[in-house]
Image (cartoon, rainbow, N blue to C red):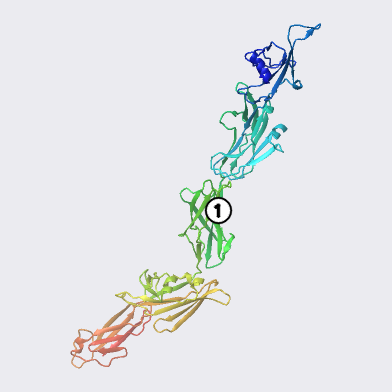
């Protein structure tokens, strides 16, 4: 309190007015009924007059949140000696007043605290999180809680806005910031926060419900507002946050990602060459996984005529499904299995190994992705319509044993050698044994002749008997050489056929022709026969007179040669030779009969053909 004008200040200076010391008063809590709560000590007046005093509020500093009243209240004090019964009483009386009777200073308390609010995070473990794939629901539990955040609807949905690395928490949203005032004291704003299942593949969702209670508080000791945030989850856990601390209230949702298994099937082609598939055709195959690759339930499969077609002559086989639980590259080998009951005239492709690779990746979709690199080749089984050259051997005169006689075959060119699986310079094969006069047989298989691959060529071979050195005693060999030429074609009905011409390899004369069709039930294959003769015979010589007799000069001596066929077959081409040097030195020959010829001292008899067991004589004088 102080003088409000100069005259009052002078009065104080002159001692007419004495202010209390100190001229201050402290406001106390108002009493019931509204009694004044600011009382100054007494002011002493010694003279009549009108005095003015200015009362102002001073707060240094003002309490937190309190806005002091900056007005000045001017009190007017009229001091007088009021007469009593017309005479001055000798005592002063003071009348106190203010303008408009306003004697109240009003302070305003305004408490507030800024609250940055709750942060909601999402952590995905197992892969990076992608924007927009997770949804968080925040639901205000009453209208006041809704309105305090400025929402029109109590239920709000937020999605994760950005990519976030595997296992790293990322903010989904922060609830709107609030500035709390003293009007919020005593109130609690409540929200329930949950995650919505968005059915993202491979993700396990966090089903925790978090209840968030936000309560503004006032610390009277520190004269400040603060905010308590309590987060309680459905598991019973509770965490309290004090806005005066540095920790930010946070609600986190933890999800895990694990891709489910992927599956793949491995297909391959089985091609049948040489003919169409027929009912009953069946081929088996096995698959092997390398380096621990997972396997299908059935590691062997059968491809049949009724299997899915993959093109002309092709049927499709398939292994699978195979289940994969980890990303990576998995390699497999496929083989054709030998048959315990092979199909006649089919060459199986058991030496071929096909490879396949399955590339397994995790693209984050929740299921492992598989990509199959199928075999680039096919299993090719070849049907060879039977085709052969039949080579016969017959020995007349005795039985022949296995390997006693051989035949040489020489291809004309590389194509002929290839189709018959022969060296370009030919090969020699032995003939089996047979009884006297019976034929032995070697079948020279040339199955590729009746295939599409053989069309457009003529394949030629020269067959001849292999004569040993020295020849077998008594055996007359067959010196014929035969050329066998075969030209595959299709007839007017489109049926494969092979036309074979047999010629004398030396003269070129055609000996025979064969036409063999693929659909002939009984095929008359080309054939060659080599015939050898075994000459078993005896020769005896006698004279008349008998040898050792005395002969007079000029006498005639007659010699007789007797040939006896002791073989079981006819004798042909036999010759007898006799050296007559000792005879002709002291004698001369008479006329020679047919069949005999003298060359110097060498007499040769060409023995006429003799049937088995027959004999023939020749007499020479």
Q: Quadrant of residue 255?
A: top right
In the image, is residue 495 above or below residue 345?
Answer: below
Residue topped by disc 1: 265
Residue in the picture at 48% in, 52% down: 331
In the image, is residue 97 above or below residue 249?
Answer: above
In the image, is residue 590 above or below residue 130?
Answer: below
Q: Can residue 264 be seen in the rendering of this structure? A: yes
Residue in the picture at 38% in, 81% down: 611
The residue lying furthest to the right in this view is 85
Image quadrant holding the N terminus, namely top right
Camera-side residue of 380 and 472:
380
Q: Position of residue 587 (x, y in %)?
A: 20, 91
Camera-side residue of 51 and 383:
51
Camera-side residue of 246 and 540:
246
Image quadrant holding the C terminus, namely bottom left
Q: Assess disc 1: are there few (<14), some (14-19) or many (≥20) residues with their C-alpha within 10 Å of its C-alpha.
A: some
Answer with left or right where residue 588 lies relative to residue 184.
left
Q: Quadrant of residue 58?
A: top right
Answer with left or right where residue 399 lies relative to residue 525.
left
Camera-side residue of 112 and 38:
38
């Amino acid at each position: 309190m102080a003088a409000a004008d100069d005259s009052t200040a002078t009065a104080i200076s002159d001692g007419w007015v004495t202010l209390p010391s100190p001229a201050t008063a402290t406001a106390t809590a108002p009493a019931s009924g509204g009694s004044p709560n600011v009382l100054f000590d007494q002011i002493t007046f010694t003279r009549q007059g009108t005095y003015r005093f200015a009362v102002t509020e001073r707060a240094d500093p003002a309490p937190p949140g309190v806005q002091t009243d900056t007005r000045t209240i001017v009190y007017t004090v009229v001091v007088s000696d009021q007469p009593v019964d017309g005479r001055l009483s000798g005592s002063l009386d003071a009348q106190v007043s203010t303008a408009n009777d306003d004697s109240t200073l009003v302070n305003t308390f305004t408490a507030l605290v800024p609250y940055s609010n709750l942060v909601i995070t999402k952590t995905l473990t197992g892969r990076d999180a992608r924007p927009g794939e997770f949804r968080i629901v925040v639901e205000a539990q009453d209208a006041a809680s809704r309105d305090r955040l400025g929402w029109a609807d109590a239920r709000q949905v937020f999605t994760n806005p950005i990519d976030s690395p595997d296992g790293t928490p990322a903010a989904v949203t922060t609830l709107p910031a609030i500035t709390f005032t003293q009007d919020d004291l005593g109130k609690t704003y409540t929200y329930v926060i949950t995650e919505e299942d968005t059915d993202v593949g491979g993700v396990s969702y966090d089903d925790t419900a978090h209840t968030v209670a936000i309560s503004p508080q006032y610390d009277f000791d520190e004269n400040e507002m603060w905010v308590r945030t309590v987060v309680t989850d459905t598991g019973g856990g509770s965490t309290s946050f004090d806005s005066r601390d540095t920790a930010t209230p946070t609600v986190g949702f933890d999800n895990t990602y694990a891709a489910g298994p992927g599956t793949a099937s491995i297909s391959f082609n089985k091609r049948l060459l040489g003919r169409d598939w027929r009912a009953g055709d069946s081929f088996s195959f096995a698959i092997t996984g390398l380096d621990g690759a997972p396997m299908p339930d059935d590691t062997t499969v059968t491809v049949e005529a009724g299997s899915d077609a993959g093109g002309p002559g092709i049927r499709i086989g398939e292994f699978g499904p195979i289940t994969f639980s980890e990303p990576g590259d998995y390699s497999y080998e496929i083989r054709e299995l030998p048959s315990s009951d092979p199909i006649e005239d089919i060459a199986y492709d058991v030496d071929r190994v096909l490879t396949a690779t399955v590339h397994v990746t995790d693209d984050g979709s929740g299921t492992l992705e598989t990509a199959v690199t199928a075999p680039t080749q096919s299993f090719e089984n070849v049907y060879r319509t039977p085709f052969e050259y039949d080579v016969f051997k017959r020995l007349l005169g005795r039985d022949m044993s296995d390997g006693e006689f051989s035949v040489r075959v020489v291809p004309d060119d590389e194509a002929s050698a290839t189709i018959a699986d022969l060296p370009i310079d030919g090969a020699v094969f032995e003939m089996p044994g047979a009884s006297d006069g019976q034929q032995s047989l070697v079948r020279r298989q040339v199955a590729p002749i009746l295939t599409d691959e053989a069309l457009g060529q003529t394949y030629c071979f020269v067959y001849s008997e292999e004569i040993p050195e020295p020849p077998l005693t008594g055996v007359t060999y067959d010196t014929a050489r035969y050329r066998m030429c075969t030209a595959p074609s299709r007839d007017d009905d489109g049926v494969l056929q092979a036309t074979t011409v047999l010629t004398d390899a030396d003269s070129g004369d055609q000996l025979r022709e064969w036409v063999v069709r693929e659909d002939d039930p009984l095929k008359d294959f080309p054939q060659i026969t080599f015939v050898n003769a075994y000459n078993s015979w005896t020769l005896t010589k006698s004279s008349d007179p008998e040898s050792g007799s005395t002969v007079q000069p000029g006498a005639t001596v007659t010699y007789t040669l007797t040939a006896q066929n002791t073989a079981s077959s006819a004798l042909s081409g036999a010759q007898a030779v006799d050296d007559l040097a000792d005879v002709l030195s002291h004698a001369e020959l008479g006329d020679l009969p047919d069949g005999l010829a003298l060359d110097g001292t060498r007499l040769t008899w060409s023995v006429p053909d003799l049937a088995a067991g027959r004999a023939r004589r020749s007499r020479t004088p």
